[in-house]
Amino acid sequence: MATMVVRWVVILAATGIAFHSTLAAVAREMATGNLMVYQPIAICGAIMVSMGVLARDHAQLPIHDRQSDGIVGVILLALAWVVQYKLVARFSDVYLTLHLDLLALWMFLLGSCVLLFGTRPTLRHRGSWLILLATFPFPIRLLTLLLGGTAASASTVIIGIAVASAALAAGRNASRVAIGTVTAGGAGAMALVVMRMLAPDTSPALVIAGPAFVAGLTSGVALYIDDVRRFGVTNNLVRMPARRVVASGSWRVVLTLLVATAAIAVVTVPSGNIRPPRPVIAGLQTTGPPVVPDLWDQTALTRYDFAGRLYGKGGSMTRQRLVARFSDPAWDLEGRRRVIVADTITTRRPILLSVYPVYMVYDLSGVRMSAAVPVPLGDGVTGQLGTLVDDKRYLTYTRLTWRWSDGPVAQSIQLLAVDDHRDGAPFPTPRLTPFSTAGDFLAILLRGDAIVRDERPEFKDREMLTAAARSMVRQQVATAASRQAADR
């Protein structure tokens, strides 16, 4: 037992040091009350499965190849470093969406266990590792969106993790699996229904994690009672067999773990924008779409109902179609009046603007994007200028985005112009496409981000978009100042 405790202390200390920036980022994100509050549920589920495995007295073959353990462990540690050093940076724009660093942490923890305990003892707890893999949040986000994107949808997915944990902890006995599954599913569903009926204004964090906690606790008690009924004494706490740690210790193993820890510890992850966007403008109008810029007319306004699934209760997204009042030779040599669209996302949960960036609400399969270039828009507002190159339609879009807030409510605004100046030229249509987005991420993972990068962007409509954006910013800031003065 002492050997096991010491080795687990080494593993957890190494993991904490190597992934200190990841753990800090996750803690800050959990403090905002978003979906990541489910992380402790997945960890507790993995521990529950591990206890169930330890309570079952399996015969273990005395086959331990430390050379194979070393090879497997080093490969896993190397993969963890590659993911943390390379892939997290490659997907930095959607860091909060993917959290690939948590996948790297899982690999590091698995590799460390293989090195210190051996491959066979580690894989004996494969059910726990499967549940622990659920800390990688991207599949959870996809399932949540498919079920509606609400806190109740997320709670349903997390209850599924608790049910899976109970089934794996129960073992291969069909009756015990049924007890664990039914009690976990029933208790979780009942807790969710009661919470939504009696306390509909409960915080999203409690709705997401509370029913799953009740599900896990109820199934654990039910399996405990079943142990008492079967054996007359709790199998988990009293009859748990003690097994020797058969993997021999080695300073080479410790040194390998130290090197991997140091290599990963120096890698910092993107901080993620979890605070209200800057600048915070008191009195800023955020109850609807932004004002129409000078010398432009709004010819259409479209609202998208799916925005609430991404950006929380009260979240909205609108599109304004803006047509220039006059033709400008600098914008079109044939004297045509230019058309741009303004897409505005409004949310009371600013962190979700980083979890689901504005370009994630379009189907951008086969579209290449440029790196963002900062553009000053006045009054402390800085925009980000970029391009979207649609190789299927042979079109190039110039986009200018910025974020601001009035404190509790945040907005993300994007102006889009297309290099096809004819009336009726297509713009990317906002729509919820989680599987298409997942496919794009997988393609980048396998082929590299060069397939989605516009390496030599041409900002064809930079001046036009900048002028329109500065007009919108100037008008709204002036209106906010007038409101503040009137309130005094």
Image (cartoon, rainbow, N blue to C red):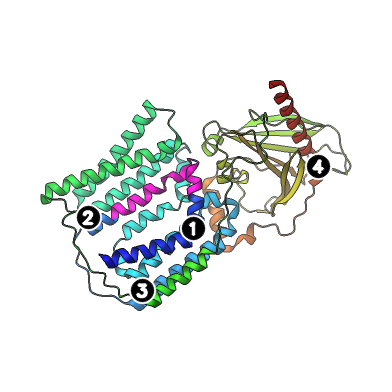
Residue corresponding to mark 4: 464
Residue corresponding to mark 1: 20
Contact check, label 2 and label 3, Cβ < 8 Å: no
Contact check, label 1 and label 3, Cβ < 8 Å: no
The crowding category of the residue bearing disc 4, from other C-alpha atoms within 10 Å (few below 14, some 14 to 19, many at least 20), is: some
The Cα atoms of the two marked residues, 2 and 3, are separated by: 27 Å
The Cα atoms of the two marked residues, 4 and 3, are separated by: 61 Å
Residue at the spot x=36%, y=78% of the render? 67
| Amino acid on which disc 4 is placed | Met
Residue corresponding to mark 3: 69
- Residue 297: quarter of image: top right
**Magenta highlight: main SS:** helix
Q: Does the magenta stretch include residue 39?
A: yes
- Say which label, 4 or 1, has the lower sequence index: 1
Image: 166 above or below 406: below
At which x and y percent is residue 466? Answer: 78, 42
- Say which label, 1 or 3, has the lower sequence index: 1
Circle 3 SS class: helix
Circle 1 SS class: helix
Say the numbered circle drawn on residue 172: 2
Residue at the spot x=73%, y=24% of the render? 485
Q: Which numbered disc, 2 or 1, marks the residue closer to the eye?
A: 1
Q: What stretch is highlighted in magenta?
A: 27-49
| Amino acid on which disc 3 is placed | Asp
| Amino acid on which disc 2 is placed | Arg
Contact check, label 2 and label 4, Cβ < 8 Å: no
| Amino acid on which disc 1 is placed | His
Q: Can residue 272 be seen in this view?
A: yes
